[in-house]
Amino acid sequence: MNKFRRAALSGITASVFAVLAALSPMFFYASRSNQHVFLDIALFAGFTQILFWLIVVNAVVATVWAALAFKKRDFLDARSAPFSAAFAVTDFFTTAFCILNVVLLISGGEETSPIVLQEAARLTPYALLYFAIVFFAIFFPEIKNKIARIAVVSVAAAALTLGAALTIYSPAIYDFESAPMVLDTGSDYSIVFATTDEGTGYVEYEYEGETYRVYDQKQGKIECDSRVHSVRVPYEHLDNNSYSVGSTQMFEPYAYGSRRGKTITSEKYSFVPCDGETQVWLCVSDWHTRNDLAKQAVGYLGDYDGVILLGDASPDLNTEDELVRYLVAFGGDLSRGAMPVVYTRGNHETRGAYAPYLADALGLDEFFFEVKAGDYRFVVLDSGEDKEDGHDEYGGLADFAAYRAENTAWVESLSGDEKTIAVCHSPRFFLETELTDRAIAALKRLNTSLTLSGHWHYCSLDTELYPDLPVFIDGGHNDGVFIASRVILSPNGITLFACNDDGESVFEERTLAWLN
């Protein structure tokens, strides 16, 4: 191999490794929310932080190697052997870090990997900026042809202008993500819908001859910095009525005025409450980002009048986009904006940077409340997290013990003699045995006939967990199979049925008697 070809091969090899090394910090950082804690638990606290900065240093060294290889034509000559050996170590670490990122991505599976890739895509502009700086600092001066230099500068200027424009004007086509999801909050309805970009949100309808336009607002100020919009509407205004939702894209609110975009209005949705003598409720739990598989199973359950979402929409709620994709749009698709949705929070919805804003985003005052559906009542409880507050997974951000105690005191305050069903993500209700015992005693006093739950990822009617309070575990996702269930409420009892995404019966139809 002649000197020129060896130098060219050296430059190409160095450049490839430099690009891989530069991308490694981005992908490693993108996995921080879902994977890093498990590495730290297995090794020692702070290990991933040290590893991240090693990956960053390796990226810088790999860039220096690429620059030397590009500029120094006799780089692979014998007298450069010490340098070659040093940078061979960089090649080794680059390869090791790439393998690590691939392992982290694969180990996340179909549930977590898409979220890591979405985060990596969000970080891509920073990687492009790094490459641009390196290129103009090291490689651009080596371009001697004047026309080529002008062409490179022109392309870079156009890219910079386009990038700046896209930061000001969103490239997304402004539209609705799905039909609305009408959550029953226990005191009214919260009409929740999502748009492809940030904007305002409102609901429009007529009631007793008057036209109402109700905005998503706080103390008179219309919310405009979110893709998720929630509007509270009284029961009597929406029951057996039609409504539409609307939104105006908001680029930037000013102190005086604002820079707005397109205004969109939905079709009219005809809403029918669940207040009949016989009601068919769809139950879905633990779909963990597998929206399509869940909807496939739902397709075999026939028509229904309402939807019960038993929690665990995704592995976490790190971003608003996860809320949009896996809960708001999913609930809208199932309910079609035409029926009530009852939602209980899963333990995975307590995790992630966006989790503290979930209740506000959905228009809920609390995650525990009671819903009246004609002659029937749902007591909705929130099991919170499923491990002790001090567990490493929670990063010192969990205080669910106090919250569960508050939840328990609330259920103990309830009264009434309606036909009652409890709804809670975990079949064991609360982590604390004492609180669970108190909640069970309160539910029995209310003549609760059944608990609907998920969390365990299999379908079963457990009649031994709590005496005189059977627990129906809905199913959810397990090893590539999804199970959804149907619950029929009638004066004669509670009829349960479940099937998988192939339409195969998993729980044969069975009717339980009401306790009152």
Image: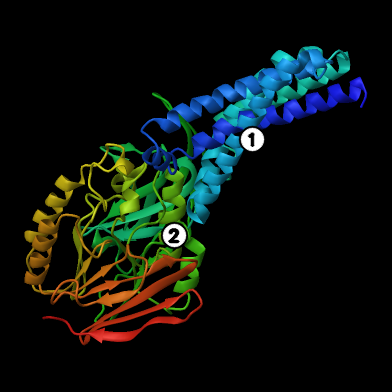
In terms of depth relative to the viewer, which is nearer, 94 or 331?
94
* Residue named by callout 2: 330
For the residue carrying disc 2, how many other residues have a C-alpha within 10 Å: few (<14), some (14-19), or many (20+)?
many
Q: Which of the 4 quarters of the picture holds residue 490?
A: bottom left
Q: Position of residue 501 (x, y in %)?
A: 49, 73
In terms of depth relative to the viewer, which is nearer, 65 or 442?
65
Q: Position of residue 3 (x, y in %)?
A: 90, 20
Residue drawn at x 79%, y 28% as measured from the top left: 12
For marks 1 and 2, give the CA distance. Answer: 39 Å
Residue drawn at x 16%, y 82% as measured from the top left: 514
* Residue named by callout 1: 95
Q: Which of the 4 quarters of the picture holds residue 313?
A: bottom left
For the residue carrying disc 1, how many other residues have a C-alpha within 10 Å: few (<14), some (14-19), or many (20+)?
some
Q: Position of residue 145 (x, y in %)?
A: 88, 15
Q: Which of the 4 quarters of the picture holds residue 303?
A: bottom left
Q: Is residue 173 left or right of residue 87?
A: left
In terms of depth relative to the viewer, which is nearer, 364 or 296?
296
Q: Position of residue 185 (x, y in %)?
A: 25, 57
**SS class, disc 1:** helix
The three-letter code of the residue at mark 2 reads: Phe
- Quadrant showing the N terminus: top right
The three-letter code of the residue at mark 1 reads: Thr
Count every numbered label the image shows and give the total.
2
In terms of depth relative to the viewer, which is nearer, 199 or 157?
157
